[in-house]
Amino acid sequence: MCHIIRKFLQDESGTAFLEYGLLAALVAVAIITAVTTLGKRLSTTFDKVAASLPAPTAPSIS
């Protein structure tokens, strides 16, 4: 029984796949955070620009 447990603890197959998976998840979280932050900042900037523009006037009918 001890031999089986020792063999299980020393087995490192699949660790590289797990590490790449964790790295990909970390990169995905970083990208999502960056895109969300950028989107909020762009929205604020566009709102400020829209507020500073004059209101359109109705065309005069002659």
Image (tube, rainbow, N blue to C red):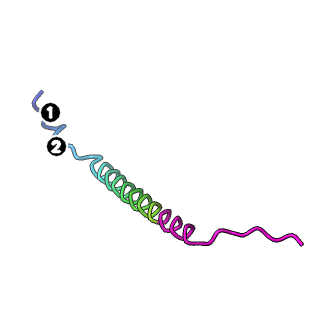
The residue range painted magenta reads 42-62
Callout 2, which amino acid? Gln
Q: Compare residues 26 and 52 and report the one nearer the observer.
A: 52
Image location (x, y in percent) of residue 29: 37, 54
6 w.r.t. 40: above or below: above
Q: Amino acid at mark 1?
A: Ile
Is residue 8 found left or right of 59 in the rendered image?
left
Query: Is residue 27 rendered to the left or right of residue 60?
Result: left
Q: Quadrant of residue 37?
A: bottom left
* Residue found farthest to the front: 62
Locate the C terminus by quadrant. bottom right
> Pointer 1: residues within 10 angstroms few (<14), some, or many (20+)?
few
Residue behind mark 2: 10
Label placed on residue 5:
1
Tell me whether the residue at label 2 lies in contact with that at label 1, contact meaning CB atoms closer than 8 angstroms: no
Q: Label 1, secondary structure: give it.
A: helix
